Amino acid sequence: MSSITKIPFSVLDLSPVFEGETAAEALRHTLSLAQHAEKLGYNRFWLAEHHNMPGIASAATSVVIGYVAGGTSTIRVGSGGIMLSNHAPIVIAEQFGTLESLYPGRIDLGLGRAPGTDRPATLALRRTLTNDGEEFPEQLEELRFFFRETVENQKVQAVPGAGLNIPIWLLSSSGFSAHLAGILGLPFAFAAHFSPEHTQPSLKLYRQTFQPSDELQKPYAMVALNVIAAESDEEAEFLATSQTQSFLNLIRGKAGKIPPPIADMNAIWNEGEKALVASRTGGSIVGSRETVKRKLEEFLERTNADEIMVNAMIYDHQKRLRSYEIIGEIFGENAAKLAA
C-alpha cells in the first residue's frame, strides 16, 4: 500500500497568467517555481498544452519545457501533457528527441488525446474536426516507432529522437487511456485535479488491464491533485478562491486570466454553479500543514497512488512558493524519518 512516507511528489504547473500580469511574467514565475521545487526535492515538473486560454501560458509546451530544463539541473521536466492529436507524431518525436539530447535523462513525455482547447481553436490547430481522438492509439504507435532504433531502408526518421529512451506516459481524465496504458504496459497519470469522480474507476481499470512490458514490469500510477497549503485553514481557503473562480469562469464560458482571491464565493455564484464547480474541484486538498497532511494520507489510503503530482493556482507568487514548500516539508519530513 502506498504511504506518504515512501512515494515521490511532483509538480504540475500550467504557467497560470494572473490578472495584472503578462504571459512573460507567468513564465518567469514558472521557472522560479521549478527551481524552488528542485531545491525542495520534488521529483518532476510537468507542463501542459492548452490553447486559446488567456489564463494559461504553456501552449508551446515543448518550448517551455526547454526553458525550465535549462534553468534547473536535476528535476525531471516533462509534459502533462502533449495533446498528440494536435500534432504529427514525427514533430513530437523530434521535439522531445531534441529535449532529451539537450537534457539527457531528465525528460518525460506525457500524452493526452483531448484537444486541450475549445472547438474553434481545435479547428485552427488541426484544420479539421474529423479527428475526435479515436485515432490516438495509431498515433501513439507511430510516435513510438520514431523513438525506436532505425531499421534498414527506413525512409523517415526522427533526428534527433530515434533510439532515445524517453519515458512515455499516458494521461487520462476518464477510462480510455487508462485501459490503453494498461494493455501497453506504460506508466499512467490521472487528472484528479479536474475529474475527481473518475479517479478510482480509472485507476482500477489501469491496474486490472496492466500487462508487463519492456518499459514497465508492474503498474505505476501517478495522480494529479489540486493542493493548496498555507499557515492556516482559513488562509488556504481564501487563496483557493482564485482557482475556484477560474473554474467558475470556464463554466460560464468566460475564460480569462486568473483572478485574485475573494472573501466570499457565495457573493458571485448561484447554487447550480457551485455544484458544477464542485464536480470539477471536489477532490482538492486545501488547508494548513496538518490538514493537508491528513487529507493526503487519506487520499493515498483510498487510491494507493505511486506518486502524487501537485497543482496550485495561487495568485500571490510568494504564497504559491510557500504552499509548495509546506507540501514539500510534509513529504520530505516523512522521507527523512524513513531513511533514519
Image: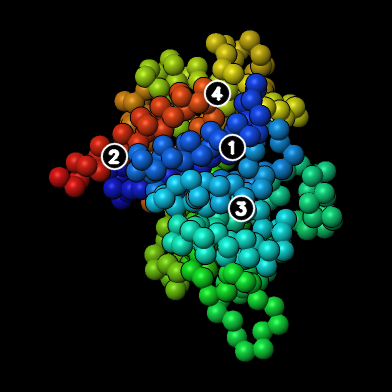
From mark 3 to mark 2, how far is it between C-alphas? 29 Å
Q: What kind of element bears circle 3?
A: helix
Label 1 or label 4, whichever comes before in sequence order: 1
Q: What kind of element bears circle 2?
A: helix
Of the pair 277 and 156, the residue shown nearer to us: 156
Classed neighbour count for the residue bearing mark 3: other residues with Cα under 10 Å, few (<14), some (14–19), many (≥20) = many
Using the rendered view, name the quadrant where residue 28 is placed: top right
Identify which amino acid the numbered label 4 is placed on.
Tyr
- Label 2: which residue? 332
* Image depth: mark 3 or mark 4 in front: 3
Classed neighbour count for the residue bearing mark 1: other residues with Cα under 10 Å, few (<14), some (14–19), many (≥20) = many
Q: Does residue 192 appear anywhere in the picture?
A: no
- Label 3: which residue? 62
* Image depth: mark 3 or mark 2 in front: 3
Label 3 or label 4, whichever comes before in sequence order: 3
Of the pair 195 and 140, the residue shown nearer to us: 140
Image vertical order of residue 317 relative to residue 138, above or below: above
- Label 1: which residue? 27
Point out which mark residue 315 bears.
4
Residue furthest to the bottom: 152
From mark 1 to mark 3, how far is it between C-alphas? 13 Å
The location of residue 162, given as percent across then percent down, is 57, 74
